[in-house]
Image: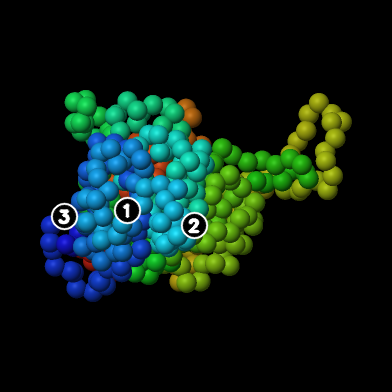
Amino acid sequence: MEVAAVRTDNGVMNTLSRPRPVAAGTRPPAGRRVLVGVTGGIAAYKAAELVRLLRGAGHDVQVVMTEAATRFVTPLTLQALSGKPVRTGLWDEAAEAAMGHIELARWAEQVVVAPASADFLARLAGGRADDLLATLCLATTAPIVLAPAMNHRMWLNPATQANVALLSGRGLRFVGPADGEQACGEVGPGRLAEPADILAALRDPSGADGGLLSGRHVLLTAGPTREAVDPVRFISNRSSGKMGFALAAALTAAGARVTLVSGPVCLATPPGVERHDVESADEMYRKVHALIADVDIYIGAAAVADYRPTQCADRKIKKTSDCLDITLTRAPDILSSVAALARRPFVVGFAAETNDVERNARDKLERKKLDMIAANDVSEGRAFDRDDNALIVLWADGRRQLSQQRKCELADELVAVIAERYLLSAGAQPALTVLA
Ligand code: PMT
């Protein structure tokens, strides 16, 4: 079965799990070695459908179940669908002799855990290796996609949300949970995402299976800059880099080759992303211009200093007077400089505003000659160093509002809008993309 994604007017990806013809010009799906983890929860029965879809899409599937998962669905069912004996424990001598667990972790080109229970997320966040599946997730270098499913109160519990934030920050991707009626009779977020949507989230980072930005090179900036006052002090801002890193992961998932220039942050590099670390606005400017040559899309998500100390003292400044004047000089505007290049990429800026958000952002869009700008309200502790955000995306003759949500999901939506506008500007059609 082929699963096709359609970009709709509101930029949301709809996945249709019915047979469709492959759109002209798209490449056939590449079969990969996919390790499917199944943990304990009523939604475990849907893993059977996921395995069936993966096999149908040409992937080589190995199922690993936790002990709790075997209480909801039998290994025999998943063995029949995957065509391979299901692995359930670390201490299975015969299975370990055939393929040891580290070998299995190396074998996987993609890991997907569906359903991922609250307990499993907690164990993963804690770096536990107390069963086969957790050990494999710890040992693998393959990208990991988690499809959580649990009671909505468990999902919304701050402990679970903290684990989700931690795992997202480490570059693991989430699909779902969906909102709706649950097996327990309550209503809320916690339902397992539809197997077809999980399949759609497993696009090949190399773009071999035809993501929307397959074959495009995206350069983006993230995080704050630090402007030195003296050898031990600097002027900076509250950016954590979370928004930019989430974008880097979403762009990779859309098939783009992603180069990330980052200010000082405490975040892991998303799998497949080429990362360059810098500190000051000057360094970021130089690095961006050194890398810009073959870039198709530039995104400025970094909170770059507008001003820097005119001089950095050679030695630590001493407390000699009650008052200290520091003279500031304008820092280079990286975004404007990229937009002014003779052979310019498609340029997307961000606008961090505390008031008149849309008016100020549209002014920046025009003044800096951008193709698009993503505006966020940063008043009253919003956006900076948070796990969620909301954006108003503007371009010359249009706008789109992206609602408050986790930055990784917001990034997926923003990438969909960017891809759509970019492809239109490049004369291509953002039509059907065959995902698997
Ligand atoms: O990092 P997080 O904690 O996740 O927070 C996310 C964020 C709030 C930092 C992010 O969503 C965001 O808004 N980034 C841009 C912040 C910013 O610098 O906005 P600005 O309105 O001051 O700048 C406008 C644009 O010009 C931005 O694209 C910025 O990267 C760019 N710029 C600014 C100054 C400068 N010297 N050079 C630039 O390129």
Q: Decide: marks 1, 3 in contact (CB < 8 A)?
A: no
Looking at the image, residue 293 sits to the left or right of residue 155; the answer is: right
Residue corresponding to mark 1: 86
In three-dimensional space, the C-alpha distance between marks 3 and 2, rounded to whole angstroms, equals 34 Å
Which of marks 2 and 1 precedes in the sequence?
A: 1
| Element marked by disc 1 | loop
Residue carrying label 3: 17
Query: Please, what secondary structure does the residue beneath circle 3 have?
Result: loop
Q: Residue at 58% of width from left, 46% of height from top? A: 265
The disc, 1 or 3, on the residue closer to the chain's N-terminal end is: 3
Q: Is residue 222 above or below residue 436?
A: above
**For the residue marked with disc 1, what is the amino acid?**
Val
Nearest to the eye among marks 3 and 2: give it: 2
Q: Nearer the viewer, residue 122 or 45?
A: 45
| Label 1 to label 2: alpha-carbon separation | 16 Å
Residue under label 2: 102
Q: Residue at x 59, y 39 (%)?
A: 237
Given residues 256 and 365, the one toward you in this image is 256
